[in-house]
Amino acid sequence: MPNPFNQQIIEEFRTNGGRVGGPFEGARLLLLTTTGARTGTPHTTPVAYYPDGADRVLVIASAGGSPQHPDWYRNLLAHPRVTVENGVFTYEAEALVLEGAERDDVFARAVEADPGWAEYQAKTERVIPVVALREIPVAGPPSFAASSPGEAVKLVHRAFRRELALIRQEFAASGTALGAQLRINCLTLCQGMHLHHTGEDTALFPFAAGRDPGLAPALDRLRDEHERIAALLEELRRAVSAEDADPRTVLTEVDRLTGELEAHLAHEEEILVPVLEAASASAS
């Protein structure tokens, strides 16, 4: 069983769609369920993470600089298949311990983003492991941490809003340098938003149109908004990817995207959530 502190975080995380208070308020947090190396039973642990592209995230087995690896790390060494909850989706992932130069590069990115990781490393003689959790693709719809399709849409939107807010905070703390991890955070957001809108254009919008043909003009407007946001995402990608990227220029693009996206998400919820909730009610 998790210790009482972890159990409180786990319950709060699951109740609030990934949001928690206390010392982890505003942090990127996931729930990692591993299989016990000795017992074979599942164990769930709250773990901080870093984005690293659309299909994997990075976690660091620091244990606060303890001389021993955390239990969850020893578990995934024995059983690399794990379950990840990010507040929106629950999915299976393959855990890969990074080695050599790749591990060192990723750890350096983490230290640049948060010097606390270097303090943990200085406290212990062990090399603190870095682990990539790569999502295992499955057929069928994703497993949402939501009670209804309409609630799922709102959870996804809330996650994008939260990530944009985190990125803006990171820019505020970054000074004149655009760190490597901050670049990746921005690029991962762009990838995620592109995939989300592609899924809506190809599946969700046709479903809504089938339920209510009168929504056609509203759905056309949402598709137009997708195109405008895609253009803003491309501008952000270009700004972030430039070798001599100016943080002020990138932040301007983030602010433009934030304003346009907030209006779009609110409009989309107004149009889609009632349709999805009605469809869910009729199917039950």
Image (tube, rainbow, N blue to C red):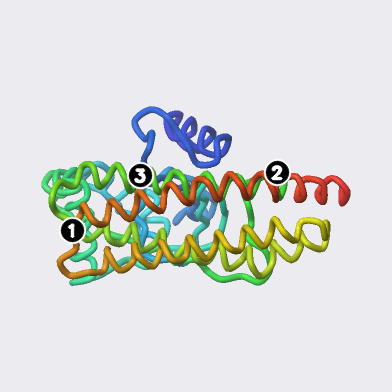
The answer for how far apart the CA atoms under marks 2 and 3 are is: 26 Å
Is disc 3 in contact with disc 1, using a CB cutoff of under 8 Å? no
For disc 2, the marked residue is 147
Amino acid tagged 3: Leu
Residue 191 appears in the rendering? yes
Q: Residue at x 23, y 42 (%)?
A: 172
The image position of residue 209, as x and y in percent, is 78, 62
**Residue beneath label 1, please?**
246
Residue type pointed to by label 2: Ser
Q: CA distance from mark 2 to mark 1?
A: 43 Å
Which numbered disc, 2 or 3, marks the residue closer to the eye? Answer: 3
Query: Looking at the image, is mark 3 or mark 1 nearer the viewer?
Result: 1
Q: How many marks overall?
A: 3
Front-most of 191 and 93?
A: 191
Question: In the rendering, at what x and y percent does residue 38 appear?
Answer: 46, 54
First along the sequence among labels 2 and 1: 2
First in sequence: mark 2 or mark 3?
A: 2
Q: What is the spatial separation of the Cα atoms under label 3 and label 1, in whole angstroms?
A: 19 Å
In the image, residue 15 sits, relative to residue 162, either above or below, namely above
Q: Dot 3 corresponds to which residue?
A: 166
**Residue displayed at 75% across by 50% down:** 276
Is residue 61 toward the left or the right of residue 120 in the image?
A: right
When asked about the image quadrant of residue 16, the answer is top right
Mark 1 surroundings: few (<14), some (14-19) or many (≥20) residues within 10 A: some
> Which mark is first along the chain, 1 or 3?
3
Between marks 2 and 1 in the image, the one whose residue lies nearer the viewer: 1
Residue type pointed to by label 1: Asp
User: Circle 3 sits in a helix, a strand or a loop, which is it?
Assistant: helix
